[in-house]
Amino acid sequence: MKRMPTVYIPHGGGPCFFMDWDPPHEWDRMAAYLRNLREDIGKTPAAIILVSAHWEEKRITVQSTPAPDLLFDYYGFPPHTYQLTYPAPGAPELAARIKMLLQSNGIDTAEDSSRDFDHGVFIPLLLSYPDANIPIVQLSLRSDLDPAAHLAAGQALAPLRDENVLIIGSGMSFHNMRMLMSSRERGGRPLPEMSLFDDWLRDAATHPDPEVRNRLLAGWDAAPGARFAHPREEHLIPLHVVAGAANTDQGRETFRDIAMGAPISAYQFG
């Protein structure tokens, strides 16, 4: 059986795909990418591990909730966006295996048996896997956001790809909220400095040598425009888990567009 790829996806802004937006087609191309993700993957996973930008803990923490509910961790959106449903099952047995793999690689790990799915999980998966019939285990970031630690976590989880488990990192490749919120004032046009980091990230994530790729990603904050793109890096670090799990598979850019006046990219490995 061909091993599962690993993917880093953008999850948009709050429940953006399920509401009217001004301008009205701001998120259409990103939504189309997410809807086509199943075809890009090529086969149905037995389970999904999802690393969301919206869950941080002191230690990397594994969700073992049998039947997670939804955590509506966005604010000020239309009432109907708080009525969304995504009844995908949890996977406590897979959670135990994830925890074992992390711990056996010297990674300090915790478990949360009551954690629900945050919007970094259910918003993109409502588009990518709308039937909500694939078991999901959410994995937290470590709150220090150490890039090397998250690359190592991904490397520890790589064997699960041979067990038909899809590893998804859910974030945004550009996440300077002040710049995003001022997009309308600029007529949706990106500033020249916005592309500096996105161009660097494409070169780093798709580098043919995995050791060079991981070394570049570990030192991401020295890249051109890095802190302009990510004043705080929680929306980038899911990529590190995905790249770590890629092992020797080369990355490719599978999506690039302008959303809210910023370049946004997605990557797939394998």
Image: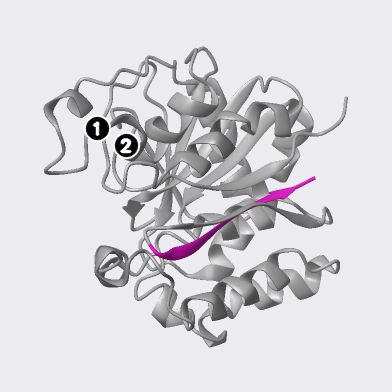
Mark carried by residue 118: 2
In this image, 105 relative to 260: left or right? right
Residue at (76% x, 64% y) in the render? 206
Report the magenta residues as a range: 261-270
Tag 1–tag 2 contact (CB < 8 Å): yes
Compared with 190, 162 (above or below) is above
Main SS type for the magenta part?
Answer: strand
> In which quadrant of the rendered view does residue 177 lie?
bottom left
Q: Secondary structure at mark 1?
A: loop
Q: Position of residue 91 (x, y in %)?
A: 50, 21
Local crowd size for mark 2, using a 10 Å CA cut-off: few (<14), some (14–19), many (≥20): many
Compared with 49, 227 (above or below) is below
Compared with 189, 62 (above or below) is above
Q: CA distance from mark 1 to mark 2?
A: 5 Å
The residue indicated by pointer 1 is: 71
In this image, 162 relative to 185: left or right? right
Amino acid type at mark 2: Asp
Amino acid type at mark 1: Leu
* Residue 163 on the magenta span: no
Seen from the viewer's position, the closer of residues 218 and 18 is 18
Q: Earlier in the sequence, mark 1 or mark 2?
A: 1
